[in-house]
Image (cartoon, coloured by chain):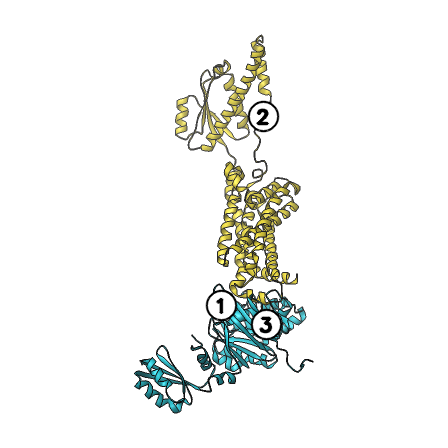
């Protein structure tokens, strides 16, 4: 007897591996996404996010591993399983010499949506992405933000069970960015499974129910925000802008009570510490005594950036 | 099949909105054909009249015969013959460009030739009028050859029948002169390039030349899809990958055929070009477009970007077009160049179209159609075998 109460994941991928020549782009990536869940792949540029989702969407052959969407295996040659997937590529994927409506009609026909239903759905999507008033304008007349919104709209058009968004806010103005994030929140709330890649920590924190932290082709940690932050022990992160003997200063800092870690960098020392505000004076004194000249202090509450730093030893923006 | 039509329709819509496609497919070819016909064709159609002179110091039977030959040509309007008194005056007139070439028949020419001692016609060419000089020299050579033939015939009879009288030999000579030449040099290229008017030649040549450029828009749009990022959406869609290629091929086919049909109709209506049997023209157009798609597809699979592909397909189209005789009748050139041109689809397209224009029907041009299709099938087959690299991301 199987347990029918367990929800069936919309996406299951396991042990994905892909190399380009000698370079390993994806090395054993695996995760699953439930219906109505927004899953974030958080990692710096070149971490393997786009390669992973290209394999998941059936664009790119994999060397090893498996992908299934709603129980159907996905490869580059499968057809039916792709109906359940909506893709929003990182680069704009719209025809500039067609109108917004024509772009949507074209892709809607490729997904086999009937004419009457398609006409109605096109207007619905244009409403969702806020472009209904510009439906018949050529997209080369659109602003960058409008193009981004249409790019998302095309991915939504056929009401996929899984929507994959690859860094959809790159190069977008703050207003459009907020509109995009609001749309994604609504989609998740409406029951769609969303796979969202980003290297913006705040987007992942805002949108994602669970986050996979990816670096050098591997998922190094996965969980809810709370679970991930717990990995660094709910510690604060302190960045001391400093010069002088930073290595000696870091060693001295590591010897203080409450300090979990201190890592010298280029012009700064990253410190993971409990109750940073209470221990700040003691930390500054130790750093100066060890030969460092401190010129600035930033204190960060525990966040995904701190988690990433803790796990990989480097910042997300690197 | 539905996805193929959807992609083809989208591509055609994009092309119809692209002004450059209209310019390359219709406006430039038509304009170029019109200009070439108006300039080169206009010059060629003008009546050529050669102003020549003759110095007849012989006044004998052969000089009389030669003047008779000139008079008959003069009656056709090709020559305007003036009699010049002496050689010095003739040389001066030629030097001063007062007259074209002059033929000199020296004193005693007829007697010398008829008595078997030989003789010569002297042509004073006018360097300022090379065409007229060559024509007159050719007329003189033709006359000399005719006289030589008659003399040979009479000599042969006299040798076998020594008893014949002089009157009988004269009679034989007159009869020999009246017999048509048993061997003539036929038109070596028949209808390949020669028997159509300039307006037709240039209408066909330019249409054939530009169809490869028009087809580029269809085939190379696949590379544009990659460049513009839309290939990822096509690959993510629930369609087979071959349908993407098929859609592009269908669009290119329609575009190429439409472009040539428009040029066919407009050059016929505006320039008076005579393309010949419509059925044959349609078959030849389809074959030509298929060959262009094959060659372009092959080139597209050998490069990485649409810019590279556009450059290389343009180079290929220009070289094949020039070698194939789209701008000048290459079949009439030297053997080597003419032979090389046979490896181009354009040469076979030109042959097929010009044969149709000269009055041939569909059955007559089937070899040319087969040759053109062979180019398309071979190059397109290789291109198709390599096409997977066009419909993948990396």
- Check whether the beta carbons of the residues at disc 2 and disc 1 lie within 8 A of each other: no
**Is A243 left or right of A209, judged from the image as shown?**
left
Identity of the residue drawn at 51% across and 18% down = B62
Q: Residue furthest top?
A: B163
- Tell me where residue B205 appears, x and y as whole percent: 55, 45
For the residue labelled by badge 3, is the local secondary structure a helix, a strand or a loop?
Answer: strand
Circle 1: element type: strand
Residues at marks 3 and 2 touching, judged by CB atoms closer than 8 Å: no
Q: Chain of mark 3?
A: A
Observer-nearest of B112 and B73:
B112
Whether labels 3 and 2 belong to a single chain: the reply is no
Which chain, by letter, is cyan? A
Q: What label sits on residue B183 in the rendered view?
A: 2
Relative to A188, is B108 above or below?
Answer: above
Question: According to the image, label 3 marks what residue?
Answer: A86
On residue A24, the disc is 1
| Crowd tier of the residue under label 1, counting other residues whose Cα lies within 10 Å: few below 14, some 14–19, many 20 or above | some
Q: Quadrant of residue A161?
A: bottom right
The yellow one among the chains is B
Q: Where does the image place residue B28, in percent across and percent down from the top left? A: 52, 52
Tell which tag, 3 or 2, sits nearer the viewer: 3
Q: Are marks 1 and 3 in contact (CB under 8 Å)?
A: no
In this picture, is B62 found above or below B304? above
Q: Secondary structure at mark 2?
A: loop
Spatial separation of the CA atoms under disc 2 and disc 1: 79 Å
The nearer-to-camera label among 2 and 1 is 1
Decide: few, some or many residues near mark 3? Use Cα within 10 Å; few <14, some 14-19, many ≥20. Answer: many
Quarter containing the N terminus of chain B? bottom right
Q: Residue at 55% of width from left, 78% of height from top?
A: A39
Gap between marks 3 and 2 measured at Cα: 79 Å
């Amino acid at each position: 007897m199987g347990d029918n109460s367990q929800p069936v994941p919309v996406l299951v991928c396991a042990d994905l591996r892909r190399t380009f020549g000698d370079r390993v782009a994806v090395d054993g990536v695996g995760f699953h996404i439930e219906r109505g869940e927004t899953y974030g792949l958080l990692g710096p540029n070149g971490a393997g996010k786009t390669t992973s989702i290209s394999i998941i969407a059936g664009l790119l052959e994999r060397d090893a591993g498996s992908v299934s969407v709603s129980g159907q295996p996905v490869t580059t040659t499968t057809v039916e399983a792709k109906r359940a997937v909506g893709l929003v590529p990182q680069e704009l994927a719209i025809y500039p010499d067609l109108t917004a409506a024509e772009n949507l009609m074209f892709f809607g026909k490729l997904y086999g949506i009937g004419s009457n239903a398609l006409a109605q759905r096109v207007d619905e999507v244009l409403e969702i992405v806020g472009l209904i008033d510009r439906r018949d304008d050529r997209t080369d007349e659109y602003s960058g933000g409008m193009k981004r919104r249409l790019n998302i709209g095309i991915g939504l058009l056929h009401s996929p069970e899984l929507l994959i968004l690859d860094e959809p806010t790159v190069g977008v103005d703050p207003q459009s960015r907020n509109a995009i994030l609001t749309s994604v929140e609504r989609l998740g709330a409406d029951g769609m499974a969303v796979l969202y890649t980003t290297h913006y920590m705040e987007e992942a924190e805002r949108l994602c129910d669970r986050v996979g932290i990816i670096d050098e082709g591997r998922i190094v940690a996965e969980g809810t925000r709370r679970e991930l932050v717990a990995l660094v022990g709910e510690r604060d992160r302190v960045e001391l802008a400093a010069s002088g003997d930073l290595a000696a200063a870091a060693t001295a800092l590591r010897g203080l009570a409450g300090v979990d870690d201190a890592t010298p960098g280029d012009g700064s020392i990253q410190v993971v510490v409990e109750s940073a505000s209470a221990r700040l004076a003691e930390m500054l004194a130790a750093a100066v005594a060890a030969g460092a000249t401190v010129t600035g202090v930033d204190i960060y509450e525990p966040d995904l950036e701190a988690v990433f730093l803790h796990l990989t030893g480097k910042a997300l923006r690197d | 099949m539905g996805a193929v039509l959807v992609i083809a329709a989208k591509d055609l819509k994009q092309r119809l909105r692209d002004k450059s496609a209209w310019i390359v497919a219709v406006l430039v070819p038509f304009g170029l054909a019109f200009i070439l016909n108006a300039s080169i064709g206009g010059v060629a159609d003008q009546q050529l009249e050669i102003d020549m002179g003759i110095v007849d110091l012989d006044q004998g039977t052969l000089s009389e015969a030669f003047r008779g030959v000139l008079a008959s040509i003069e009656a056709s309007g090709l020559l305007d013959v003036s009699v010049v008194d002496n050689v010095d005056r003739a040389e001066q007139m030629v030097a001063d460009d007062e007259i074209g070439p002059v033929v000199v028949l020296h004193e005693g020419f007829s007697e010398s030739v008829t008595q078997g001692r030989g003789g010569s016609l002297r042509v004073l060419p006018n360097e300022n009028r090379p065409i007229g000089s060559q024509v007159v020299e050719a007329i003189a050579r033709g006359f000399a050859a005719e006289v030589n033939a008659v003399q040979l015939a009479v000599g042969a009879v006299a040798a076998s029948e020594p008893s014949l009288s002089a009157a009988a030999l004269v009679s034989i000579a007159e009869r020999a002169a009246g017999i048509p030449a048993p061997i003539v040099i036929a038109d070596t290229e028949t209808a390949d390039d020669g028997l159509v008017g300039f307006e037709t030649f240039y209408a066909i040549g330019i249409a054939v030349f530009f169809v490869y450029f028009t087809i580029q828009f269809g085939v190379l749009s696949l590379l544009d899809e990659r460049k513009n990022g839309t290939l990822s959406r096509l690959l993510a869609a629930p369609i087979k990958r071959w349908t993407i290629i098929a859609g592009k091929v269908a669009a290119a086919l329609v575009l190429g055929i439409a472009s040539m049909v428009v040029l066919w109709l407009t050059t016929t209506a505006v320039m008076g070009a005579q393309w010949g049997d419509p059925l044959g023209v349609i078959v030849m157009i389809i074959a030509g477009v298929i060959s262009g798609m094959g060659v372009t597809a092959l080139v597209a699979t050998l490069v990485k970007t649409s810019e590279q592909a556009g450059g290389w397909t343009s180079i290929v189209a220009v070289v094949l077009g020039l070698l194939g005789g789209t701008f000048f009748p290459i079949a009439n050139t030297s053997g080597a160049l003419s032979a090389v041109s046979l490896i181009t689809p354009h040469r076979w397209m030109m042959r097929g179209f010009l044969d149709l224009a000269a009055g041939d029907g569909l059955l007559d041009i089937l070899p040319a159609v087969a040759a053109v299709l062979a180019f398309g099938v071979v190059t397109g087959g290789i291109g198709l075998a390599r096409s997977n690299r066009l419909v993948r991301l990396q």
